[in-house]
Amino acid sequence: MADQWRLAFMFDAAGGDHAGLEAALVRQADAIRRVAGAADIRLGVADRHPDLTSATQTDYAVDQWRTVDAAVEITVGAARAADLPALAAALSEILAPLAASGSVEVMSGPMFSMVPVRDGGVFLSLAFKRDPAISSAQFRSWWHDRHSGVAIPVLGPGLLAYDQVHCDAAATGAVARGFGAAPVAYDAYDNLTWADRQGYLASISDPAGMARIFADEIGNIDDGTRRHALMRRIG
């Protein structure tokens, strides 16, 4: 049983104004904290540094994945999971005006910390669906019990946190309705944290190791459903 749940929002900048989105999220950070109350929050905007586009990730079709401009994460104790739809509704007044129309995806589920959490300046925000050939239970078992053991040694000591959010279909539907967005049936919201961009790039620099991670994902992740960005933490 997970002792924490996460509510996550992924969205793009209204009008493609990335600088404006970042400035607005910074201005709204205190308002988000007031609405979230005792919950932990994390805000991020996509890091668009050219080093990221030139980084080699063996076998990954990163250029074919959908990108995202920003992420907002709210983490609560499991006892507060039932409060998340109301929290999503309250946050819609703050976040919806900042987002491009139709770009907001909201998800929720129990969160498992696979690496003891340490704060960092960048985090990978990644959502995806399971391969349709396997069941939800099979996917969850693979991701939690096997894949983490493949990925963590490859990514190395620079990996400061690795959070697996196992998206719950009913909870995701409820928070999406609360926000006023169409629900998206992701199976996973994946978060990995590093100190900075260079720490991230060092972590993915071993082609053989990255190939092992990719090989373990085949038959488990529906690769074409991924939406992702490396986020700079703000606010």
Image: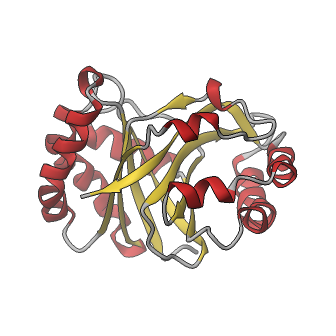
Q: Residue at x 39, y 52 (%)?
A: 232
Query: For this view, does 137 lie left or right of residue 99?
Result: right
Residue 186 visible within the image: no
Q: Where is residue 188 in the image (x, y as percent from the top left)?
A: 59, 49
**How many marks on residues?**
0
Q: Residue at x 24, y 55 (%)?
A: 87
Q: Residue at x 28, y 62 (%)?
A: 83
Q: Which residue is drawn at 44% across and 37% down?
A: 48
Q: From the viewer's perspective, is residue 161 above or below residue 134?
A: below
Q: From the viewer's perspective, is residue 18 above or below residue 203?
A: above
Observer-nearest of 137 and 126: 126
Task: Choose top left, top right, bottom left or bottom right for residue 179.
Answer: top left
Residue 214 visible within the image: yes
Observer-nearest of 79 and 50: 50
Q: Where is residue 6 in the image (x, y as percent from the top left)?
A: 42, 60
Observer-nearest of 223 and 234: 234
Query: For this view, does 37 lie left or right of residue 141?
Result: left
Question: What is the basis of the colouring in this image?
Answer: secondary structure
Q: Where is residue 135 in the image (x, y as percent from the top left)?
A: 75, 45
Q: From the viewer's perspective, is residue 31 above or below residue 181?
A: below
Task: Choose top left, top right, bottom left or bottom right for residue 126.
Answer: top right
